[in-house]
Image: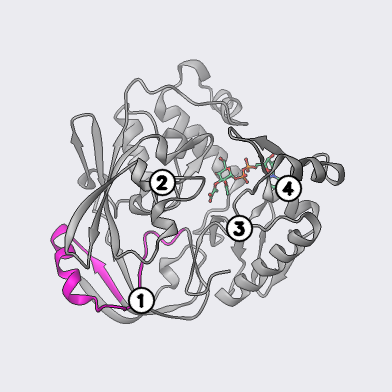
């Protein structure tokens, strides 16, 4: 375990926002968890940081103790098989987990290829892409409770997953750190190719959609993502900045008058999910900048740091866009990443 004070986090968040935390605890192996109860005082603000790819550091100083887990040297070292389940350490990078699975002929998460971040962060926002969500394969999550000094398992139902949401995301006050995930990955898992662009990309890459391997689907998804989303190593960003809002049927019917081309997806239990990116573009908000915080030229849902943006710049941009969208549509956009310490 490594403990440092006033630690810079600029290189630990994919938006490259400058911030320092009061104290950083880096967990290096499983036995380190047992030292946490003695280290953390009651009422001390604590934040768990994974890969930092879904986090917005809104101020330059965080009063928190930040806990992070050092990734295993290779993904393989963090992965174990237990019967039909694949177990992975929370610190392992998610893209490497997917790579390992598809190269071992195991399906279920190939559509979630190339999503940046750690495995431990994946259940918090129930990562999802191209018609698949983590909840579809997740069996249980192991957590360590640093008040009780014990490991627990939380099953899929207890995680209370929703669209980009979970019990963990709704309850950041819990003294818990996710330590491992167990997923049911199968060699006979059906391919899910219905999302726009997936089949076309497979064909473009020279693969047969119906008989494609999991590795080929992962390759197609990686290609699609690279076309749409900026690489954080080149243009710092945190993926989709807003959730796609779900509105009532009546609200959608009213909006359709003013915005007939608005992309929408009817939901299983009523209501419509609509495209936040489309609205931002249509309302002419895509070119707005606050300092160096602005939207990605090729995708209006991605806030990027064009240089020296601060957390305050990102907050101001987000608040302005939320107000404008609210006035024009009566929809309150919700920010997708975790904002810390100030929420929007
Ligand atoms: N669109 C626009 N303008 C844009 C971008 C998109 O009008 O600038 C329209 C597209 O034409 C399309 C619709 O919006 O009709 C959906 O676009 P896209 O397929 O790019 O997906 P998205 O809604 O922007 C969501 C997820 C992504 C995920 C993709 C693919 C959320 C908040 N985002 O984005 O997840 O990769 O679908 O499944 O649900 C993330 O969570 O960080 C993330 C990147």
Q: Residue at x 32, y 26 (%)?
A: 186
Q: Residue at x 13, y 61 (%)?
A: 31
Q: Residue at x 51, y 58 (%)?
A: 232
Find disc 2 in the rendering and name its residue: 160
Q: Which mark is residue 334?
A: 3
Q: Residues within 10 Å of mark 3 (few under 14, many from 20)?
A: some
Q: Quadrant of the N terminus?
A: bottom left
Q: Residue at x 81, y 44 (%)?
A: 254
Q: Does dot 1 land on a helix, a strand or a loop? A: loop
Q: Residues within 10 Å of mark 2 (few under 14, many from 20)?
A: some
Q: Does dot 3 land on a helix, a strand or a loop? A: loop
Find disc 1 in the rendering and name its residue: 45
- Say whether residue 201 is magenta: no
Q: Which mark is residue 174?
A: none
Q: Earlier in the sequence, mark 2 or mark 4?
A: 2
Asked if the beta carbon under badge 4 is closer than 8 A to the nearest atom of ligand 1, the reply is yes
Is disc 2 in contact with disc 1, using a CB cutoff of under 8 Å? Answer: no
| Ligand 1 image position (quadrant) | top right
- Say whether residue 44 is magenta: yes
Gap between marks 2 and 4 measured at Cα: 29 Å
């Amino acid at each position: 375990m490594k403990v440092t004070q006033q630690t810079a986090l600029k290189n630990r968040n994919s938006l490259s926002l400058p911030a320092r935390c009061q104290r950083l605890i880096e967990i290096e192996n499983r036995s380190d968890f047992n030292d946490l109860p003695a280290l953390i005082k009651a009422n001390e603000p604590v934040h768990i940081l994974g890969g930092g790819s879904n986090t917005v550091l809104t101020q330059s100083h965080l009063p928190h103790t930040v806990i992070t887990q050092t990734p295993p040297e290779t993904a393989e070292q963090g992965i174990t098989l237990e019967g039909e389940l694949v177990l992975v350490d929370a610190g392992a990078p998610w893209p490497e987990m997917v790579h390992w699975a598809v190269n071992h002929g195991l399906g279920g998460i190939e559509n979630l290829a190339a999503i940046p971040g750690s495995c431990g962060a994946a259940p918090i926002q129930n990562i999802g892409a191209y018609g698949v969500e983590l909840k579809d394969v997740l069996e249980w999550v192991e957590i360590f409770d640093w008040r009780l000094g014990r490991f627990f398992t939380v099953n899929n139902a207890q995680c209370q997953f929703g669209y980009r949401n979970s019990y963990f995301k709704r309850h950041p006050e819990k003294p818990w750190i996710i330590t491992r995930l167990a997923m049911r990955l199968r060699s006979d898992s059906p391919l899910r190719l219905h999302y726009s662009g997936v089949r076309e990309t497979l064909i473009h890459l020279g693969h047969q959609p119906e008989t494609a391997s999991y590795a080929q689907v992962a390759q197609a998804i990686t290609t699609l993502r690279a076309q749409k989303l900026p690489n954080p190593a080149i243009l710092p960003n945190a993926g989709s900045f807003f959730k796609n809002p779900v509105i009532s049927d009546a609200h959608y019917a009213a909006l359709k008058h003013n915005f007939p081309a608005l992309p929408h997806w009817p939901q299983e239990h009523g209501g419509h999910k609509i495209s936040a990116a489309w609205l931002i573009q249509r309302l002419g908000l895509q070119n707005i900048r606050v300092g160096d915080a602005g939207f990605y030229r090729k995708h209006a849902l991605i806030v990027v740091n064009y240089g020296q943006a601060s957390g305050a710049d990102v907050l101001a941009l987000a608040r302005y866009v939320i107000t404008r969208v609210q006035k024009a549509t009566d929809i309150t956009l919700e920010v997708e990443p975790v904002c810390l310490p100030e929420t929007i």
